């Protein structure tokens, strides 16, 4: 392993460990926060909270994918250590985000008179829902004020700086919110605290970026060439379509559920989404921590090396989602029953659909990451539009006939028939210069093994779990050990597994060498 590869591996390991660790803290705080929220405020507020979050997620379409385009543009400059070009890109990014924040705020205000259209049964709460919505909008808009400064940490393989900062501010926010709810029991103040903490986080990261990268301060004297600006905005146009598709997939389900099934269903479903989102956030922090290193790889190394790392990444992601999907299905209903009661539990079929959606979405990570870090933005740009349109049509049809499970299945079908196919196709065709058939064969092999292990896990969990926290933890722990042993036994001799083992040994050896006295 070369010195450059060891450096990349060290950055990946640091980002991975810190990202995972901070998100475990986030996970614990989120559940404590939600528990107190439900206890003091109830389902109506829970449904309203989920609805407004999703409406503003749709509004974040205004970001247009500029973040990904800018970070991609920064990779080469970071490799070349071209400070003047980095500063020029960041100045362009800052200007774009100020416009975005203002656009989100104005469009959000224009939506206020139509809030009743999104709610089937208006909530029976004393607070004015327009004031609540305005605070949610303000929180979203101010997040754009300084957040562009985060891009330079990601591009410089220092994602851990963002992770640690976010968790410190979230810890403070949670403690203040919980204390406030316990004493005052007021939802308006609860949201105001969130707005203040969001603003504080972004200001802190901006100050830290200026201190760490002092060359960013002062007036930008070197402007980007017109050709480069044109390329960036061509990428932005393409990413806008991907952004639109992603927003529709992730942001409209709760809106459709609220319109067709009511806020109470949204509230119950949001607890499952909280659990899934908590797991996804932990994984995202861990996996996104390697994005910067992959970006550097895709701007410096050959196609053979890129494909080898891609397969290694796919192996890790398949292992993670094999493990977590099976455990989630087996523990999520018992967990919610013990946590907040049986009245918040969904049927087995609905839970299966939720976990299937989680698995399919997660398995896209390697293809998505390589496509974005290779700058494959314009190719396949119409696919997310097709995915979004298909999702809306199927969600509305299935919601009326099958209820909540129909909306989730519509999302699964929309994703499977579009981006699940196209992302790896683009990577294999334009980067690896190979046919994509080997990828789908690899994908199917991992999926079949997951399905078999999934079926075998159910009687094991049913035998262990006896309706108590102890047996739930024991069951989850048993599955964790058994599934890891099975997966490792099956794939131990696989080239990707051996490559990961060598990387881990290299990191351990590096750590031991660094602490050995001379």
Image (tube, grey):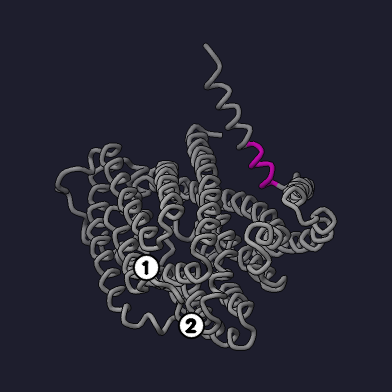
Relative depth, front residue between 459 and 316: 459
The disc at residue 100 is none
Which element type, helix, strand or loop, lies under badge 1? helix
**Residue 313 lies in the magenta stretch:** no
Q: Residue at x 60, y 85 (%)?
A: 398
227 up-or-down from 415: above or below: above
Q: Residue at x 62, y 36 (%)?
A: 504
* Magenta highlight range: 495-502
CA neighbours of label 2 inside 10 A, class few (<14), some (14 to 19), many (20+): some
The disc at residue 60 is 1
Q: Quadrant of residue 105?
A: bottom left
Residue 314 percent coordinates (x, y): 61, 54
Q: Earlier in the sequence, mark 1 or mark 2?
A: 1
Specify whether residue 481 is in view. Answer: yes
**Residue 498 lies in the magenta stretch:** yes
Q: Residue at x 53, y 69 (%)?
A: 43
156 up-or-down from 437: above or below: above
Which element type, helix, strand or loop, lies under badge 2? loop
Q: Quadrant of residue 132?
A: bottom left
The disc at residue 121 is 2
Q: Mark 1 or mark 2, which is nearer to you?
A: 2
Residue 327 percent coordinates (x, y): 71, 56
């Amino acid at each position: 392993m070369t010195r450059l590869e060891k450096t990349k591996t060290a950055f990946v390991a640091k980002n991975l460990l810190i990202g995972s660790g901070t998100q475990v803290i986030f996970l614990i705080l989120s559940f404590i926060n939600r528990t107190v929220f439900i206890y003091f405020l109830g389902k109506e507020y829970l449904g309203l909270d989920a609805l407004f979050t999703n409406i503003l997620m749709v509004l974040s379409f205004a970001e247009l994918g500029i973040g990904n385009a800018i970070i991609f543009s920064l990779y080469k400059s970071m490799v070349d250590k071209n400070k003047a070009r980095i500063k020029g890109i960041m100045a362009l990014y800052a200007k774009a985000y100020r416009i975005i924040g203002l656009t989100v705020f104005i469009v959000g205000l224009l939506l206020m008179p139509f809030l009743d259209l999104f709610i089937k049964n208006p909530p029976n709460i004393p607070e004015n829902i327009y004031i609540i919505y305005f605070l949610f909008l303000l929180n979203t808009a101010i997040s754009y004020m300084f957040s562009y400064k985060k891009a330079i940490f990601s591009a410089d393989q220092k994602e851990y700086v963002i992770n640690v900062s976010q968790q410190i501010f979230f810890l403070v926010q949670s403690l203040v919110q919980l204390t406030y709810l316990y004493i005052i029991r007021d939802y308006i103040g609860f949201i105001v605290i969130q707005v203040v903490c969001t603003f504080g986080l972004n200001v802190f990261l901006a100050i830290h970026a200026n201190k760490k990268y002092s060359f960013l301060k002062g007036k930008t004297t070197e402007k980007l060439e017109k050709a480069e600006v044109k390329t960036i905005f061509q990428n932005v146009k393409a990413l806008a379509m991907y952004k639109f598709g992603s927003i529709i997939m992730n942001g409209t389900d709760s809106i459709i559920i609220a319109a067709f099934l009511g806020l109470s269903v949204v509230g119950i479903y949001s607890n499952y989404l909280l659990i899934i989102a908590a797991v996804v956030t932990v994984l995202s922090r861990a996996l996104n921590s390697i994005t910067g290193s992959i970006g550097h790889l895709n701007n410096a190394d050959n196609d053979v090396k890129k494909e080898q790392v891609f397969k290694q990444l796919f192996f890790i992601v398949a292992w993670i989602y094999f493990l977590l999907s099976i455990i989630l299905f087996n523990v999520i209903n018992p967990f919610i029953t013990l946590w907040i009661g049986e009245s918040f539990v969904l049927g087995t079929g609905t839970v299966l659909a939720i976990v299937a959606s989680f698995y399919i979405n997660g398995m896209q990570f390697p293809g998505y990451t390589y496509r974005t870090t290779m700058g494959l933005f314009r190719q396949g740009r119409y696919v997310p539009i097709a995915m979004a349109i298909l999702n809306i049509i199927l969600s509305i049809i299935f919601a009326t006939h099958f209820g909540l499970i129909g909306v989730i299945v519509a999302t699964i079908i929309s994703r499977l028939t579009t981006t699940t196919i196209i992302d790896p196709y683009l990577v294999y065709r334009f980067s690896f210069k190979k046919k994509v058939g080997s990828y789908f064969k690899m994908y199917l092999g991992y999926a079949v093994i997951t399905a078999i292990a999934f079926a075998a896990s159910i009687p094991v969990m049913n035998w262990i779990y006896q309706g108590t926290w102890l047996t739930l933890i024991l069951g989850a722990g048993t599955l964790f050990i058994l599934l890891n042993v099975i997966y490792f036994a099956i794939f131990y001799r696989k080239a990707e597994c051996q490559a990961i083992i060598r990387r881990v040994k290299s990191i351990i050896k590096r750590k031991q060498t660094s602490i050995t006295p001379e």
